């Protein structure tokens, strides 16, 4: 291959700078600029150790890997992220949720040093998020939503390439360990372009963690991946966290959100909910009822349409043959469903789900937009 790696982009080179500003993993492609080899780049025969400065966190007993406040980022007239703040401790998995266009990817790119916030303050891995992006990049793994390793290179060649980009020592040993850990050894010679979605994500994760980052940022890593592959991927995420790695992962899957130690929900660039799954559900104030059966020939889907416009009903949705009804005003909600609480319908009060909460948050945002219009 004629393409060769160059060092990671320096501070200030961000998106649109030399090499496109990506760091590590499946973004390694974008750390390549003109294809010319740097004179100081180590060869495979004479590898150099990764240049690294000790993190301010080391030796100080601090557990706050991410601690930022008031982050803002605009692109022209679009205010993508508004006064964002989050604290994530070492070894925690934080789920990052929100509708499309909520500002999740922009926030991840600010946290890993690829974008400089317009304003705000705080630290990532003990480094100033506004002024020390270069040092942050060295200790972060970032897996982009779109697979962007070289499809015309094999699994092993892609990992070797990534090791060279990071100027890692013991490259063969590190690559072999990554192959073994993620079950890629038997496929090491297979071209990345021929892999299924699940295997591509395993390769991307191997590349993202090859340099042993302290913080791993994952942007919708399992989108379009089958359930078994998603479970395998999440088993590895929990294993990394158990080893002390901190993970911030964006996802649209509620079952994945529930596997996180804590979650943050953003929309319109703002944080709307934060805490464990149980805390977020409890804070929502939602009351939820399930109804099974039929009412005067109406199944769950027709009954949902009947209930949606009634006072007190904020959500009515069929799940197969079960009707799911939620609202925050218990008396009004119970009054709305009262005419239908008779046989053969069977009603039970149940715990709201994360999906209930997040759908309600989206409805709140839409209502707020209508009032502001």
Image (cartoon, helix red, strand yellow):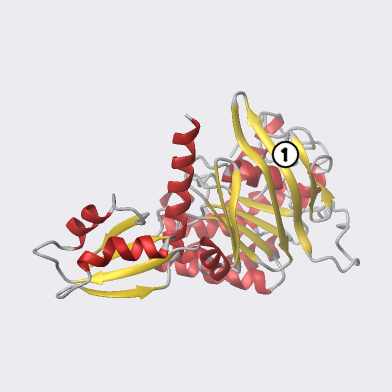
Q: Which residue is drawn at 40% across and 68% down?
A: 228
The crowd level at tag 1 (other Cα within 10 Å; few <14, some 14-19, many 20+) is many
Q: What count of labels does the image hold?
A: 1
Residue placed most toward the observer, 15 or 263: 263
Q: In which quarter of the image is the N terminus?
A: top right
Residue placed most toward the observer, 349 or 164: 349
Residue sitting farthest toward the top: 76
Compared to residue 202, the image places residue 129 above or below, namely: above
Q: Which quadrant of the view contains residue 212?
A: bottom right
Q: Which residue is drawn at 86% across and 61% down?
A: 57
Q: Which residue is drawn at 73% across and 37% down?
A: 117
Q: Which quadrant of the view contains residue 91?
A: bottom right
* Res. 45 in view: yes
Q: Residue at x 67, y 35 (%)?
A: 73
Compared to residue 200, the image places residue 256 above or below, namely: below
Residue placed most toward the observer, 164 or 225: 225
Can you give x and y, in whole percent of width and height, for residue 280 in the image?
55, 64
Can you give x and y, in whole percent of width and height, for residue 178 in the image?
62, 65
Can you give x and y, in whole percent of width and height, for residue 88 in the image?
71, 61
Residue sitting farthest toward the right: 59
Q: Is mark 1 on a helix, strand or loop?
A: loop
Q: Mark 1 points at which residue?
A: 6
State left or right for residue 274 relative to residue 14.
left
State left or right for residue 80 relative to residue 189.
right
State left or right for residue 2 relative to residue 163.
left
* Res. 167 in view: no
Compared to residue 69, the image places residue 184 above or below, namely: below
Can you give x and y, in whole percent of width and height, for residue 253 in the image?
44, 59
């Amino acid at each position: 291959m004629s393409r060769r790696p160059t060092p990671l982009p320096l501070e200030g080179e961000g998106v649109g700078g030399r090499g496109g500003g990506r760091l590590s993993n499946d973004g390694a492609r974008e750390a390549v600029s003109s294809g010319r080899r740097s004179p100081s780049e180590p060869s495979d025969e004479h590898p150099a150790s990764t240049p690294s400065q000790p993190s301010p966190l080391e030796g100080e007993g601090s557990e706050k890997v991410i601690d930022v406040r008031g982050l803002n980022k605009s692109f022209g007239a679009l205010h993508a992220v508004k006064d964002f703040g989050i604290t994530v401790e070492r070894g925690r998995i934080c789920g990052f949720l929100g509708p499309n266009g909520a500002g999740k990817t922009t926030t991840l790119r600010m946290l890993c040093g690829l974008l400089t916030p317009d304003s705000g303050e705080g630290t990532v891995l003990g480094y100033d998020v506004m002024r020390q992006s270069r040092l942050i990049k060295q200790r972060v793994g970032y897996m982009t939503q779109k697979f962007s390793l070289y499809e015309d290179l094999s699994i092993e060649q892609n990992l070797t390439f990534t090791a060279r980009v990071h100027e890692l020592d013991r490259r063969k040993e590190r690559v072999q360990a990554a192959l073994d850990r993620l079950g890629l050894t038997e496929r090491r010679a297979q071209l990345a372009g021929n892999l299924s979605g699940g295997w591509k994500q395993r390769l991307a994760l191997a590349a993202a963690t090859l340099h042993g980052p302290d913080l791993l940022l994952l942007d919708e890593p399992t989108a379009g991946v089958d359930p078994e592959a998603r479970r395998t991927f999440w088993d590895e995420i929990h294993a990394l966290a158990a080893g002390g790695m901190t993970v911030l992962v964006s996802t649209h899957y509620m079952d994945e959100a529930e596997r996180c130690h804590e979650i943050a929900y953003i929309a319109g660039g703002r944080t709307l909910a934060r805490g464990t799954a149980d805390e977020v559900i409890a804070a929502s104030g939602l009351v939820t009822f399930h109804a099974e059966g039929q009412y005067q020939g109406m199944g769950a889907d027709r009954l949902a349409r009947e209930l949606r416009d009634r006072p007190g009903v904020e959500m009515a949705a069929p799940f197969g043959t079960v009707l799911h009804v939620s609202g925050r005003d218990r008396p009004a909600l119970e009054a709305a469903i009262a005419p239908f609480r008779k046989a053969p319908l069977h009603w039970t009060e149940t715990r709201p789900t994360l999906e209930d909460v997040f759908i309600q948050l989206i409805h709140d945002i839409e209502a707020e937009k209508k009032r502001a219009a």
